[in-house]
Image (tube, helix red, strand yellow):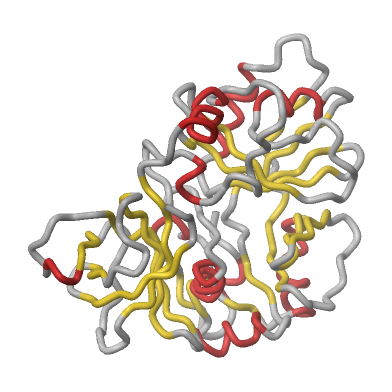
Amino acid sequence: MKSPLLSLPGAVPAEGRDEGVAAHYGDLFREQRALADGSGLVDLSHRGVVTVTGSDRLAWLHLLITQHVSELAPGQATESLILTANGHIEHALYLVDDGETVWMHVEPGTQGELIAYLESMKFFYRVEVADRTEDYAVVYLPAGSIAEVPDGATVRETPYGRDLFLPREGLEAYAAAHGPAAGVLAYEALRVEGHRPRLGFETDHRTIPHELGWIGTAVHLQKGCYRGQETVARVQNLGKPPRRLVFLHLDGSEVLLPGHGTPVRLAADGAEGRQLGFITSSARHHELGPIALALVKRNVAVDAELLAGDTAAAQETVVEP
C-alpha cells in the first residue's frame, strides 16, 4: 500500500520489506537527529494492522502468544511472539488494548498469515479478528514528542516512543501538522542502536527468542502453555541458545554497508575464515557512524574482533553467551 507521504518534497521510496513508504526525505542524519530530539514522526503505514474484539479477547490471546495478557490493563503496551511447535519465531506482535479492542501492528504483508492462524484457533471463544490495514496507518512518534493524539486514534506508549493507530484518511493532515516526516532509514538506525530485533531481519526459520533477547520483553516465563512453550522452558532451564545477538561498530572507512546475510568471521582468520554468523541489520547512525546487528555462534568470545564481509567490526554484547 503506497503512502501518500511519498508525495512530500525530497521523498525517496524505500525498497524491500519497507516498500510503500519513504526511505528518507533527502537528509538522513537530519531526520535521525530530529527523532533523537523528540520531534517529527515516521510513516509506518505499510505495516499490517490487526484487531481482536469480543469479551474473550485477552483470555483467548493469552493462550496463543508468548506474553502474559489475560489481565492486560487498557492502554498498557506490550509485545509478544507467536512460535511454531518447535519454538521458532513465526510472528512478532506489537499490542495495546483500549478497553474494548486489542490493536496490534505486524510486519508488512504478514497480517494475512497471522489472521489465518488466529481464525483457526477461535473455537468457542467470543472473539472477532479483523484486518484493519486498509483503514488504519501506523505512525511513530519519538520519545519526548509533544504531538497530540487526534480523535479516532489509538496510542501504544513504549519507552522508545509512541505508535499511533491513525485513521488512514487523516495521515496527510497529521503529518503536515506534526512533522517533519522522517524516513524508515532514520527509524531503523535508532532501532539498531537500541538493539531491538525485527522479524525477518534478526530472525530466520530457526530463531528462538533467547537468541535475540526477547525473553522478558516479549516472552513471559511464568505463564501457562502456548505453542512452542516447551522449547522456551527447556532452553531457559536446561540449556543455552545456539546463537546470540551482538551489536557491531563497523569500520567507517568502508563506503558500502554490509547487507543482511553478510557473513561474519573472526578478524584473525581473515575473509576466508570460517563463518561464525551473519549480519541481520545495518545502518548509518548520525553519531555512531556505521553500525549493525549480527547473529553469531554462542561461543564467539565477547571481546573478539570480527569481520563483516570485508569490514572490520568491534562487538558489544546484547545477549550474554
Q: Quadrant of residue 247?
A: bottom left
Classify the position of the N terminus by image quarter.
bottom right
Where is residue 30? Give x, y as percent. 56, 90
Which residue sits furthest left?
A: 272
Would you place residue 171 above or below residue 245 in this image? Answer: below
Would you place residue 78 above or below residue 162 in this image? Answer: above
**Residue 258 in sight here:** yes
**Residue 133 in sight here:** no
Q: Quadrant of residue 310?
A: bottom left
Q: Nearer the viewer, residue 258 or 307?
A: 307
Name the residue: 27% across, 54% down.
277
Name the residue: 61% across, 61% down.
44
Would you place residue 9 above or below residue 175 in this image? Answer: below
Which residue sits furthest top?
A: 124
Where is residue 132? Give x, y as percent. 70, 42
Name the residue: 72% across, 57% down.
168
- Position of residue 182 in the picture relative to residue 209 (left or right): right
Q: Nearer the viewer, residue 158 or 165?
A: 158
- Position of residue 265 in the picture relative to residue 271 (left or right): right
Name the residue: 59% across, 38% down.
81
- Position of residue 38 in the picture relative to residue 42 (left or right): right
Where is residue 110? Give x, y as percent. 52, 40
Please count the marks in the image: 0
Where is residue 259? Give x, y as percent. 30, 65
